[in-house]
Structure formats: C-alpha cells, structure tokens
Amino acid sequence: MLEQIIPIIREAGRIVLSARDAAARTREKTSAADLVTEYDLAVETFLKEKLPPLVPGSVFFGEEEEENADPSRGWAFIVDPIDGTTNFVRGLRQSAVSVALAHDGTVEYGVVYDPYKDEMFSARRGGGAFLNGQPIRVSRRPIEQGVFGMGTAIYRREYLEPTMRLTEQLFRRSCDFRRLGAAALDLCNVACGRTDLFFEYSLCPWDQAAGSLIVTEAGGFVCTLEGGPLSLTDRCSVWASNQVNKDLLHELEV
Ligand code: 2AM
Ligand code: CA
C-alpha cells in the first residue's frame, strides 16, 4: 500500500513546489490566521481523485472538503493537502502533504512529505517508520538535553494561557524550543530524533493522524495532554515524545 501511496504524494508535492504567488491566491476561511490557497484546493482535488481508487469502498476525509465523510468506519483516507498553510503563503518553505489511511478508526498507514527537503516519512502499523526508505527512531535524550516543538493552537485562543504555561515549564527544564507551524512535520521531527518532544493543545485529525503513527512506529509515545488516545473525528490535544520523556507529562501542570 505504501508503495502505491508514496508516488501519488510525491506528485502532490510537485504541485506545492510549482506554486507561484501563493499569497495572492489565498482567502481567509474563519479568520486571518485560517487560510486556504488555490494550491491547498488543487492538491486536495488531485489526492481525492488518486487515493480512493487504491482501496475500493474507502472514503476521503480532507481538510478542505465541505462535506466530510466519517473517518472512523471502514477504510478512510485522512488528508491535509498542505499542512503549514501560513508558512506556505509566506514562503517559509516549511510545509508538508499529510496522508493517513485508517481502518475502523485505527491509523494503519501514514505518510508525510516535505517537498522542500524532498523528505518522505512513512509508516505502516507494526512495520516501523522510515525517512526516504531508511528506518528512523526517536531520540534517547532526556528533557535536560532536549529541544522540544510546540504549536500555539491559533484557532482556539482560549488555549493561549495553558500553552504558554506548559511552554515555560518545559523551557525551564530543556535547552530550547521551536514553533515551526506545521504539526505533521513537528511530529516527524520527534519520530526521527531531531527534536525530543512536541505538544499542541488543539489539532485536527488531518494534522496529526499520519504523523502520530510515524512517531509510534519510530518507537515514540503519543497521547493527548489528558493522557488518552488521539481522535480521528474531532480536534484534540497532542503530546508526542521519545521513551525517555514519556512520563514527563505527569510531572507537568497542563
Ligand atoms: P494547517 O497549516 O494545515 O492549517 C499550527 O499550529 C498547526 O495547526 C498547523 O499544523 C495547522 O495546519 C494546524 N491547524 C490548522 N487549522 C487548524 C484548526 N482549525 N484547528 C486546529 N489546528 C489547525
Ligand atoms: Ca492544511
């Protein structure tokens, strides 16, 4: 299945790279922080045409779809055509195409592609995680030697204070942190050991479905900030870490 999905996602990445003047081809969805470009729509249309035929009877659940299908029954593709849209619009070159394939509410395959670095992260449940075909593992660094990633849940301003409180607690114990603006890539950075943990208070299923499988298949640990499983149907918080920092969550005020 990954062998069939990956070339399609690489092709979708070419649409991202072909973008010219994305800022002018942008409109606000719910606010100035919530954007969609012609390219998000073009990538989603392309993936919606190419992916479902790979799995007869599957549904397609994409960020830009007006009428979303139910991703928790049968086979479902859960797709963010461009994760990191604000980065994309501003030419920051830190965005990814994210595709998960779930069965009855469990993610079985995950692929995240960064077209700027030509980095293809992939995982199959029980089959390990890979970057451009090479196995990847989470780091072994404790928080004291760690750099963590975080997101600011920009669409839910009520999470501002807890986000800043948790950032401060972790920053006091770690070396530094990053706020990259593309949750799928934040998760892949944990998976391949570039960073040592990541959190965000509110993400949508398409932001985290593929990346969270890639983290767990790379030997990492993923849960919500309340310690439960991630949702494929609703927004939820996300905590992803290596094994060394797995229990750190219990020591923090979230
Ligand atoms: P996007 O770039 O696809 O919009 C930034 O904090 C992260 O939040 C990005 O991965 C961003 O994805 C994601 N995000 C976008 N829209 C969101 C929404 N409505 N709710 C929660 N997270 C969202
Ligand atoms: Ca998106």
Image (cartoon, rainbow, N blue to C red):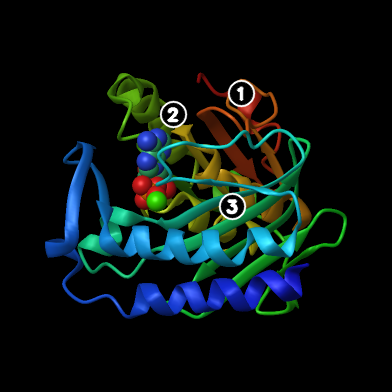
Q: Position of residue 157 (x, y in %)?
A: 28, 24
Front label number (1 vs 3): 3
Helix, strand or loop at mark 1: helix
Cα distance in 3D space between marks 2 and 1: 11 Å
- Residue 230 visible in the snapshot: yes
Quadrant holding ligand 1?
A: top left
Q: Which residue is mark 1?
A: 251
Query: Amino acid under label 1?
Result: Glu
In terms of depth relative to the viewer, which is nearer, 111 or 76? 76
Query: Amino acid under label 2?
Result: Leu
Q: Position of residue 219 (x, y in %)?
A: 78, 53
Cα distance in 3D space between marks 1 and 3: 16 Å
Apparent side of residue 134 relative to residue 85 in the rendered image (left or right):
right
Dots 1, 3 in contact, CB < 8 A: no
Q: Position of residue 86 (x, y in %)?
A: 27, 54
Q: Which residue is mark 3?
A: 196
- Tell me which label, 1 or 3, sits earlier in the chain: 3
Figure check: 4 above or below 251? below
Query: Does the beta carbon at disc 3 come under 8 Å from ligand 1?
Result: no
Helix, strand or loop at mark 3: loop
Quarter the N terminus occupies: bottom right
Cα distance in 3D space between marks 3 and 2: 15 Å
Residue at screen point 61% across, 45% down: 209
Q: Which residue is mark 2?
A: 166
Helix, strand or loop at mark 2: helix
